[in-house]
Image (spheres, rainbow, N blue to C red):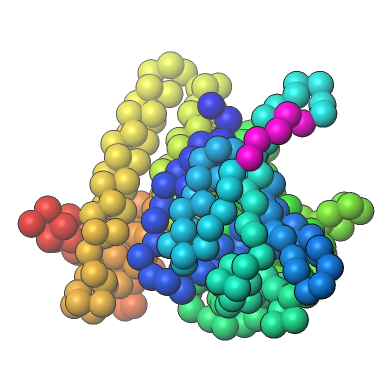
């Protein structure tokens, strides 16, 4: 399965509990693949056009969580492979327009916005949710030999806003104007992994990194390649289990040291214990980082 499809399927399964996160994710979706149709007399229709049924269902669920009715339709694209695409239609009733205004998609006068207001992405959790929505709507991922992450936007202003959201999370995205649309993109594996982690795609990060390491070791001797791969699988599985455990915990209730290592593991799911220990403030030992993560896993299992 292509990396882009893996990524969309994983992100579509993330279900944020906070209303602000759901609103930010909805905003990211509509700003990448949303279309506003003016019907006259102050009436508008809005729809999303996506390539994945999982993304269409996710958008449908998001809208329903705000009490907004929508309808999923399909059509066959006019191209060589004739792929099926999905459109999610939103009638412009009062509740729908209110939610889209709160998400920064429409102004109070029903004019489309190129970028949402600052309040939509004011928190770190909301910025991650906005990135997730943008990746669901207009993201593509390729690699590992030539890693490339790209998020399509309707305009350069929208792509620049997306890059600004990533920059606030310590991630550098470049932008480019492609004529009919614009993109925010990254080519470095470390930056790509950071964007995916911020959006909540920890499994995609691990798969991406695993494929990259596997591809590099194929040129080495079979014995060394097999040993390296086994170590990678063990490390990846341990990191994945730690990420899943941390997600089940309420970080605000944890002691400062445990909360710090939990946030570091979520932000950097592929880093080794030694590297995580170095990022602690103050830096600690590999053994201490391991003990803290093991305690988090035990707390999550209770």
Looking at the picture, does residue 253 appear above or below residue 128?
below
Residue 12 x/y as whole percent = 48, 47
Residue 8 x/y as whole percent = 53, 43
Q: Nearer the viewer, residue 42 or 253?
A: 42
Please say whether residue 244 is visible from this viewpoint. Answer: yes
Residue 99 quadrant: bottom right
* Residue situated furthest right in the rendering: 179
Q: Is residue 269 left or right of residue 81?
A: left
Q: Is residue 92 left or right of residue 120?
A: right
Q: Nearer the viewer, residue 277 or 5?
A: 5
Please say whether residue 168 is visible from this viewpoint. Answer: no
Q: Magenta residues: mostly which secondary structure?
A: strand
**Quadrant holding the C terminus:** bottom left
Looking at the picture, does residue 256 appear above or below residue 72?
below
The residue positioned 70% from the left and 59% from the top of the image is: 46
The residue positioned 81% from the left and 64% from the top of the image is: 38
Q: Is residue 143 left or right of residue 78?
A: left
Residue 79 x/y as whole percent = 82, 26
Q: Is residue 270 magenta?
A: no
The residue positioned 91% from the left and 53% from the top of the image is: 179
* Residue situated furthest top in the rendering: 222
Residue 82 x/y as whole percent = 75, 24
Magenta residues, start to end: 73-77
Q: Nearer the viewer, residue 54 or 244?
A: 54
The residue positioned 20% from the left and 77% from the top of the image is: 253
Residue 91 quadrant: bottom right
Count the marks: 0
* Residue situated furthest left in the rendering: 302
């Amino acid at each position: 399965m292509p990396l882009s499809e893996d990524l969309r399927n994983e992100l579509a399964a993330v279900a944020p509990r906070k209303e602000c996160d759901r609103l930010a994710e909805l905003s990211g979706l509509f700003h990448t693949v949303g279309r506003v149709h003016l019907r006259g007399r102050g009436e508008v229709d809005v729809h999303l056009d996506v390539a994945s049924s999982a993304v269409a269902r996710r958008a449908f669920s998001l809208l329903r969580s705000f009490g907004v009715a929508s309808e999923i339709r399909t059509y066959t694209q006019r191209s060589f492979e004739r792929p099926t695409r999905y459109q999610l239609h939103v009638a412009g009733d009062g509740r729908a327009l209110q939610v889209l205004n709160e998400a920064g998609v429409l102004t109070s006068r029903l004019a489309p916005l190129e970028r949402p207001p600052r309040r939509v992405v004011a928190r770190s959790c909301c910025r991650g949710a906005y990135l997730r929505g943008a990746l669901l709507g207009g993201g593509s991922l390729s690699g590992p030999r030539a890693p490339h992450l790209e998020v399509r936007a309707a305009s350069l202003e929208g792509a620049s806003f997306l890059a600004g959201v990533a920059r606030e999370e310590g991630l550098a995205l470049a932008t480019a104007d492609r004529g009919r649309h614009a993109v925010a993109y990254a080519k470095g594996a470390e930056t790509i992994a950071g964007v995916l982690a911020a959006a909540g795609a920890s499994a995609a990060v691990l798969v991406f990194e695993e494929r990259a390491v596997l591809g590099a070791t194929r040129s080495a001797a079979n014995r060394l390649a097999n040993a390296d791969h086994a170590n990678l699988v063990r490390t990846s599985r341990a990191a994945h289990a730690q990420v899943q455990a941390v997600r089940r915990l309420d970080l605000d209730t944890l002691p400062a040291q445990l909360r710090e290592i939990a946030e570091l593991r979520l932000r950097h799911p592929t880093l080794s214990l030694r590297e995580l220990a170095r990022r602690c403030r103050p830096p600690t030992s590999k053994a201490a980082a391991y003990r803290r993560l093991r305690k988090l896993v035990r707390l999550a299992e209770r």
